[in-house]
């Protein structure tokens, strides 16, 4: 059975934003879906978040898929790096993923500093990641569209730019049809 793991954003929970909608829609289509609650979401750290993902996922194979939101994308990429380069997953959809950020408070800069400064092996991740799509909004206050080039060039992701979606973290972000459609497409 195809398994999907949805990794939420900083200060998020599995019941926020579009995660419950996506989980329900994927389950209706026969996917086994998990939305793990990540630790210390106000002050996320790389090691605990990757360890939590490892504990929830176990092994990976070509029937394993991921959807990440913001720092959830970083978590997925760092998690994949921990596997041998000959490992493969079915694919991933990244929503508002980043390698650089803007308009952060001093506290947010401190929280994300290690995520931004500690490198990971993008070549290895690209090998493990069979297919990927990265979705961005043209008005995201934190993630500039420059990040799309990083996902395209370093990870090999298909890029989609949506209009007026912000950081995909408002009460109006309850359904994301593009995420559902793209995950279904890469799982075929």
Image (spheres, helix red, strand yellow):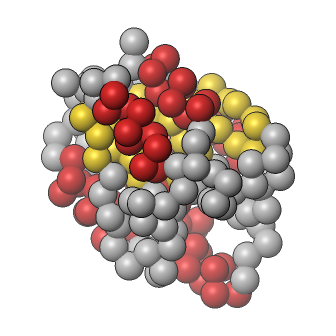
Task: Please indicate whether residue 120 sits to the left or right of residue 65 in the image.
Answer: right
Q: Which picture quadrant has residue 116?
A: bottom right
Residue drawn at 65 percent across, 38 percent down:
135
Q: Residue furthest bottom?
A: 107
Q: Quadrant of the C terminus?
A: top left
Residue drawn at 63 percent across, 51 percent down:
173
Q: Is residue 48 above or below residue 152?
A: below
Q: Is residue 47 above or below residue 95?
A: below
Residue 93 shows in the view = yes
Residue drawn at 33 percent across, 73 percent down:
39
Residue drawn at 59 percent across, 75 percent down:
113
- Residue 66 in picture, x, y percent from top left: 39, 39
Please state which of residues 18 and 45 is positioned toward the viewer in this rendering.
18
Q: Is residue 96 above or below residue 101?
A: above
- Residue 147 in picture, x, y percent from top left: 71, 47
Task: Please indicate whether residue 164 sits to the left or right of residue 181 in the image.
Answer: right
- Residue 179 in picture, x, y percent from top left: 55, 34
């Amino acid at each position: 059975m195809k398994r999907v793991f949805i990794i939420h954003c900083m200060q998020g929970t599995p019941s926020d934003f579009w995660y419950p909608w996506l989980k329900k829609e994927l389950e209706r289509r026969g996917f086994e879906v998990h939305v793990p609650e990540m630790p210390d979401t106000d002050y996320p750290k790389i090691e605990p978040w990757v360890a939590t993902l490892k504990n929830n996922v176990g092994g990976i194979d070509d029937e394993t898929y991921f959807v990440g939101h913001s720092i959830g994308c970083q978590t997925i990429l760092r998690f994949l790096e921990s596997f041998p380069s000959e490992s493969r997953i079915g694919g991933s959809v990244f929503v508002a993923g980043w390698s650089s950020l803007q308009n952060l408070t001093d506290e947010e800069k401190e929280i994300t500093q290690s995520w931004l400064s500690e490198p990971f092996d993008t070549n290895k991740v690209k090998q493990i990641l069979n297919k990927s799509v990265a979705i961005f909004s043209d008005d995201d206050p934190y993630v500039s569209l420059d990040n799309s080039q990083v996902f395209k060039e370093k990870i090999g992701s298909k890029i989609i730019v949506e209009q007026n979606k912000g950081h995909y973290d408002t009460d109006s972000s309850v359904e994301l049809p593009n995420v559902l459609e793209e995950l279904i497409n890469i799982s075929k």
